[in-house]
Image (tube, coloured by chain):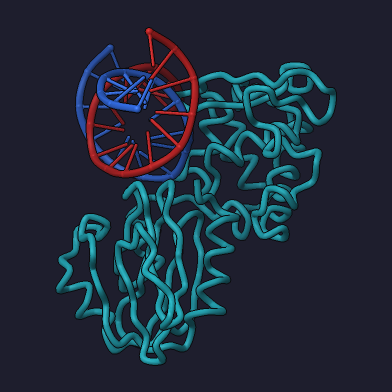
Chain colours: A cyan, B red, C blue
Amino acid sequence: MPELPDVDVFRKGIESKSLGRTIRRIEVKDRHVLGGISAQRFRRSFTGRRLLSTRRHGKHLFVETDGPDYLVMHFGMTGEPVYLTDADETPRHARVIFHFEDGSGLVYNCQRRLGRLWLTGSPEKFIEQKHLGPDALTELDWEQFHEVLSSRRGTIKPALMQQELLAGIGNIYSDEILFQAKVHPQRRADDLDETTLRDLYRAMRQVLKTAIARNVQAERFPRSYLLRHRSDRGRCPRCGAALQKAKVSGRTAWFCSNCQS
DNA sequence: AGTAGATCCTGGCGGC
DNA sequence: TGCCGCCAGGATCTAC
């Protein structure tokens, strides 16, 4: 579930709660979440290091340290950072805990264990190795967006979600963007005319920015957003019709068949 | 080239 | 009440 806006909010949280702190000790409670690195190597790389800056690319978060390695975080479906003061209890699904010298802590919490932590010497190389496309909000301009999608022969929804094409959009926000742009999730990408693609690009930027500005709290989102209504008895906030649910390339897509053509 | 389907993963929920 | 199976969905892999 953590998509681009969620990860950006996580990033800001880490900035304000953990930046500048020095790691005194690292507890790897579940080595399963470490992406192909041993717990020893992971601890050795980051113990004694200070957190210097953060950066987000799509759904990935990079934390720069004063050592040679960046910490890379991906949150899967249920991952989140949790910030501890010395009095706080460890959350239930703590997988890795960074204890800082001032007594505070940063927990990588992840219920379903689909998220991962890595280390990398270079975010650019990491992005390249993972074949991630440009960040949907900060890197993808209209020309690139047009180029990527106007030649796609497949369905629009999975194209928006494909991280190799553009990075950051998942199931929830692809539905929202398509709804705002009034595009049916099952339309072919190369079938959309220039104007519709423009609408889609504009909706993408507007939705992502709004979600970040509202701190990804659904109750603070505009009423006109699909996000607040995607449930079995949900109605379209625009026309009032019952929302439809369909499997589109293996994912549940919510949409309004009246508004989205 | 693109999609479908299985897999990984856990917990909540519907159905019987 | 108790248990089974389904579903959520991000990413990755295989098969077509």
- Residue A184 placement: quadrant: top right
Q: Residue at x 60, y 20 (%)?
A: A245
Is A176 drawn above or below residue A250 in the view shown? below
Q: Residue furthest right?
A: A239
Pick the residue in front: A10 or A123. Answer: A10
Pick the residue in front: A166 or A234. Answer: A234
Q: Residue at x 72, y 58 (%)?
A: A214
Is A116 drawn above or below residue A107 in the view shown? above
Task: Tally the numbered discs.
Answer: 0
Relative horizontal placement of residue A31, taking residue A210 as reference (left or right): left
Residue C3 spot, x, y in % from top left: 25, 24
Residue C6 spot, x, y in % from top left: 39, 20
Q: Residue at x 57, y 62 (%)?
A: A8
Residue A66 spot, x, y in % from top left: 36, 88
- Residue A41 placement: quadrant: bottom left
Relative horizontal placement of residue A109, taking residue A216 as reference (left or right): left
Q: Residue furthest bottom?
A: A102
Residue A252 spot, x, y in % from top left: 52, 26
Q: Residue at x 75, y 52 (%)?
A: A220
Relative horizontal placement of residue A223, taking residue A102 as reference (left or right): right
Pick the residue in front: A100 or A84. Answer: A84
Q: Quadrant of the C terminus of chain A?
A: top right
Pick the residue in front: A41 or A90. Answer: A90
